[in-house]
Image (tube, helix red, strand yellow):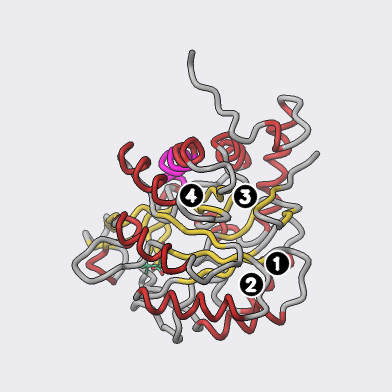
């Protein structure tokens, strides 16, 4: 059975990997994800130029009844140089994703310039969920700002680059972001990032469950699946075929992986469920995915990729 994927010139023997932010802050975590026989790759925690401790804890919380998670980590990471050193020296046959999330456009441009001039030969993911300028929405919700930064990036960047997008909830927004992205030679789009600024309450104490931002945080896990499916499907329908799609959000079973591939995903990332089960989740999910394909006598993911049926 062929459970592989392709982005640019990179072939992935398995389509599952971690979502940026989960199991990818330290070299030990990155090694563990890569060492899993059932992961196809690994993505680093989104890097800023300097080390960041991130927000005060509690900053991550697992919601009850396996509904999902809420987080306001605040971009804790070991700093750009740490991850560049890792990807340059790590021996692996698997393609590696390097995620960057500068808090300013100049930070992003500086990190991308260093990656461009380095010997890194993997894929780069620009996290557009980062704030643009104070008082304005995150970059990906500011279509002109998105066009502006991609214009500056592609003036010098020649390696395979993709963008990590927050979810959109309006059909016109799908049209608008696709119109921007189709103007650039992107290798991929990764959708979705967490659903921004959710709120969860501890019923025993009538208190929010995370400390930063008065309890507001990004939502992940099963409760975001329908939004993830919609964003993968909407962007697959709108983006040039040359722009591949990484489907992220709401994956807790092989059926969820299957559904994202049906919507058009070339690779699939696991966040909240990887926090729950650790790296054995990759083997479980791939086994369940194979069973889903078997049920319908499919031999490869290529037979179902993008083949979601509508009702005539
Ligand atoms: C939300 C930002 C802190 C601007 C970027 C990092 C990030 C975080 C984070 O580090 O809080 N959490 C997410 O769910 N998605 C993200 O992209």
Q: How crowded is the residue under tag 1: few (<14 C-alpha within 10 Å), some, or many (20+)?
A: many
Task: Identify the secondary structure beneath mark 4.
Answer: loop
Between the residue at mark 2 and the residue at mark 3, the CA separation in whole angstroms equals: 18 Å
Q: How crowded is the residue under tag 4: few (<14 C-alpha within 10 Å), some, or many (20+)?
A: many
Q: Quarter of the image containing the N terminus?
A: top right
Find the residue positioned furthest to the front.
155
Q: Is residue 80 left or right of residue 39?
A: left
For the residue pair 240 and 64, the one nearer the viewer reads as: 240
* Residue identifier under label 2: 30
* Residue identifier under label 4: 249
For the residue pair 57 and 196, the one nearer the viewer reads as: 196
Where residue 239 appears, as percent x and y from the top left, is 49, 42
Between the residue at mark 4 and the residue at mark 1, the CA separation in whole angstroms equals: 20 Å
Task: Identify the secondary structure beneath mark 3.
Answer: strand
Please tell me whether mark 4 or mark 3 is closer to you in this view: 3
Q: How crowded is the residue under tag 2: few (<14 C-alpha within 10 Å), some, or many (20+)?
A: many
Q: Quadrant of residue 279?
A: bottom right
Between the residue at mark 1 and the residue at mark 3, the CA separation in whole angstroms equals: 15 Å
Mark 2 CB near ligand 1 (8 Å cut): no
Mark 2 and mark 1 in contact (Cβ < 8 Å)? yes
Residue range highlighted in magenta: 222-232
Please tell me whether mark 2 or mark 3 is closer to you in this view: 3
Image mark for residue 126: none
- Sequence-wise first label, 4 or 2: 2
Between the residue at mark 4 and the residue at mark 3, the CA separation in whole angstroms equals: 12 Å
Image mark for residue 34: 1
For the residue pair 23 and 163, the one nearer the viewer reads as: 163
In the rendered image, is residue 302 in sight?
yes
- Sequence-wise first label, 1 or 3: 1
Mark 1 CB near ligand 1 (8 Å cut): no
Image mark for residue 267: 3
């Amino acid at each position: 059975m062929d459970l592989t994927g392709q982005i640019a010139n990179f072939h992935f023997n398995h389509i599952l990997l971690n979502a940026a932010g989960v199991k990818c802050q330290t070299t030990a975590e990155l090694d563990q994800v890569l060492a899993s026989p059932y992961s196809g790759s690994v993505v680093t925690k989104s890097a800023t130029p300097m080390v960041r401790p991130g927000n005060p804890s509690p900053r991550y919380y697992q919601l009850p009844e396996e509904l999902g998670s809420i987080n306001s980590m605040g971009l804790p990471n070991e700093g750009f140089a740490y991850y560049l050193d890792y990807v340059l020296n790590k021996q692996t046959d698997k393609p590696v994703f390097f995620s960057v999330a500068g808090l300013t456009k100049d930070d992003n441009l500086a990190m991308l310039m260093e990656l461009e001039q380095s010997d890194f030969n993997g894929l780069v993911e620009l996290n557009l969920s980062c704030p643009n300028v104070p008082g304005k929405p995150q970059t990906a919700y500011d279509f002109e700002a998105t066009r502006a930064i991609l214009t500056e990036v592609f003036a010098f960047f020649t390696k395979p680059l993709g963008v990590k997008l927050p979810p959109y909830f309006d059909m016109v927004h799908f049209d608008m972001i696709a119109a921007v992205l189709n103007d650039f030679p992107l290798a991929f789009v990764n959708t979705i990032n967490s659903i921004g600024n959710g709120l969860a309450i501890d019923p025993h104490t009538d208190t929010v469950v995370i400390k930063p931002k008065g309890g507001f945080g990004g939502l992940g896990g099963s409760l975001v699946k329908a939004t993830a499916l919609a964003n993968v499907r909407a962007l697959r329908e709108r983006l040039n075929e040359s722009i591949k799609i990484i489907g992220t959000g709401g994956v807790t079973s092989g059926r969820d992986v299957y559904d994202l591939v049906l919507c058009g995903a070339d690779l699939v990332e696991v966040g909240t469920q990887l926090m729950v089960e650790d790296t054995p989740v990759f083997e479980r999910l791939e086994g369940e995915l194979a069973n889903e394909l078997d049920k319908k006598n499919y031999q490869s993911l290529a037979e179902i990729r993008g083949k979601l049926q509508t009702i005539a």
